[in-house]
Amino acid sequence: MLKEKMLDALNEQLNFELYSAYIYFSMSAYFESINLKGFANWMRVQAMEELTHVKRFYDYIIDRGGRVKMSEIKAPANEWESPLAAFLNVLEHEQLVTSRINNLMDIALELRDHATSSFLKWFIDEQVEEEASVDEIVQSLKLNENNPGGLFLIDKELSQRTFMPPQDITI
Ligand code: FEO
């Protein structure tokens, strides 16, 4: 059974993962509106991945006999100044997610909740990957800020991203 402090923190993060998906769907719509279909695709895949993160927290809370509680999700922005501004926003958001996951791990360690520490390890590793891949795109965008041809090539590259449902998650 999860201790109350741990359960509340896990539920909060479950809702924050939904907020992440909400932001990325909004960014995808922004990119559709400026006709950057590859960027829009990347964001849609990102949003879908966030939903699988929601599912991981959902299943884990249930598996530990806890009660999942949904809460209000604040509205994301709908417009950004440029593709670079949007991706800087993604990087900032993912850094915030990383610090939140680290806080969850701190709580699990404080409560000597070894099962939750083990569960969170997946997210610790995932955040390293997420920040690295977003940072790579930010760097490319910075190099091509005033180069429409470069932006076109990045858009083409981002159109290749596909959503791969994780093998260890079921509906
Ligand atoms: Fe669920 Fe992008 O962290």
Image (cartoon, helix red, strand yellow):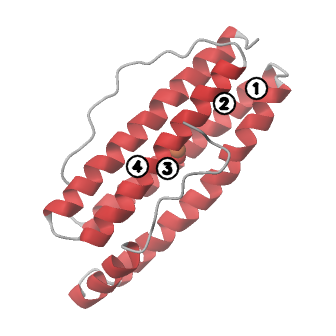
Q: Could you say which quadrant of the image residue 3 lies in?
A: top right
In front: 45, or 88? 45
The answer for how far apart the CA atoms under marks 3 and 4 are is 5 Å
Mark 4 element type: helix
Question: What residue is shown with label 1?
Answer: 108
Marks 3/4 in contact by CB < 8 Å: the verdict is yes
The answer for how far apart the CA atoms under marks 2 and 4 are is 22 Å
Which tag, 3 or 2, sits closer to the chain's start? Answer: 3
The answer for how far apart the CA atoms under marks 2 and 1 are is 6 Å
Image mark for residue 95: none
Q: The disc labelled 4 sits on which kind of residue?
A: Ala
For mark 2, does the 10 Å Cα neighbourhood hold few (<14), some (14 to 19), or many (20 or more) residues?
some
User: How far from the left and from the top, in percent, is residue 144?
Assistant: 32, 84
Image mark for residue 104: 2
Marks 2/1 in contact by CB < 8 Å: the verdict is yes
Q: Is mark 1 within 8 Å of ligand 1?
A: no
Question: What residue is shown with label 4?
Answer: 47
